[in-house]
Image (tube, helix red, strand yellow):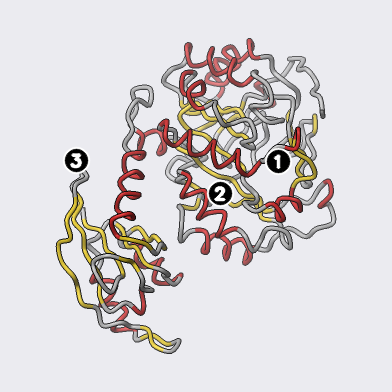
Amino acid sequence: MKLAFAANDEVFVSQHFGHSRKFVIAELDDSTYEYNIAEVRINDAPCSVGEHDPEKFEKSIALVSDCRALFAVKVGNFAASRLSGNGTQVLERPGYIKDLIGDYVKYLKRQHRPNFGGMKRRDVIDDHPCFSSKAHNTKGRLHLPVSPKCNIQCRFCTRANNTDENRPGVAAGILKPEEAVETVKRALELCPQISVVGIAGPGDTLADDNAIRAFEEVHKAYPELIKCLSTNGLNLPGKADRLYEVGVRTITVTVNAIDPETLKGVVSWVKDGRDLIKAQLQGIRECAEKGMVVKVNTVLIPGVNDNSIAKIARVVKEAGATRHNIIPLIPQNEFAGVAPPTCEQIEKARMEAGKYIEEFRHCKHCRADACGIPGISDVSKELYKGRELETFSHG
């Protein structure tokens, strides 16, 4: 494969895409990951004093169209969109070319880790309706509400026990881990299109061991189904090996801030005063290194973290996440009086974050006991009809 670098020499990436006078092209072997600098392509830079020449711009795009990825100090939104549309991954990173290639090789190795329960990594993603647009209207998912506790308090979160609200943090009640296999069996009878068994609350899935116990039994009974965990990440470090053992191959970590000041505006308390941001990034790295596909959810809160979304995307991508999902604020709890972001604000955030990481755009804000095809069918009420579920603790 070929990689392009916006640089003045064969050593350091130092140029913006639109201002670059040359692109250094490296050829990287897909199997051995050995590389060499193959050529330097001279570019007639299309940008000058804030304006760009459309004809030169098209030539610049074509000049790197055969490259798997482009590294540059900065790439404008329009150029990034055009390059991505041509199949060229856009990576805004200055640095030594040798080091950037080394980082890219680490990324490629993570992408090709085997052992997904007999499925290829790409198939796992393509069959997951919460990770892939291809599966969103055709594949189903089941959320097992086995996790009653939480270890942080987000200012926007109100967990509830009801059957009416369609949002995260809500379930009709709590399942016991030993009920998980039977629940999966009934769910498949109601919705044979289910490809994913997920656990997403209504509390945090790693605040106790209920989720791991449930996955252990479900994986034994249904090894062919994708196992997915959602967590705030506080207790994620040190769990990657165990999660992998019980079949988890996709994981979602909710990251709403990557600096302490912004975090104070999002979270009112963290159990034992621990460092949530450090734990989240460490957990993402460990899961990615283990071979799991990591998605990050970010709640977009106007006036609180709306100026940090792109930075969050860049940092979690560097940690090993490969998907990002921006969720608009649902006004409640301390943010009950805050207006949710507009469509324009959401799209702007996605465009900025999309320069660093692939954006997922089909989230339906599912309940912790959701069952069916997202946006198409919901059979959760029928699934739990006539069953008494435990109420859950708000502690």
Of residues 31 and 139, the one drawn nearer to the viewer in this rendering: 31
The amino acid sitting under disc 3 is Ser
Determine the CA span between mark 3 and mark 2: 31 Å
Which residue occupies 66% across, 55% down?
300
Label ID, residue 31: 3
Up the image or down, 195 lies above or below 134; here it is above
**Quadrant hosting residue 13:** bottom left
Q: Nearer the viewer, residue 187 or 286?
A: 286
* Residue 260 vertical position relative to residue 237 in the rendered view, above or below: below
- The residue beneath circle 2 is 325
Query: Compared to 235, does 364 lie above or below?
Result: below
Res 208 label:
none
Residue 12 position in % (x across, y down): 31, 66
Query: What label sits on residue 167 in the rendered view?
Result: 1
Mark 3 or mark 2: whose residue is earlier in sequence:
3
Q: Quadrant of residue 121?
A: top left
Indicate the amino acid at tag 1.
Answer: Arg
Q: Report the mark closest to the observer, 1 or 3.
A: 3
Coordinates of residue 217 in the picture (x, y in percent):
54, 12
Element at label 1: loop
- In front here: 388 or 356? 356
Furthest residue in direction left, as rendered: 38
Depth check: give the residue in front, 193 or 240.
Answer: 240
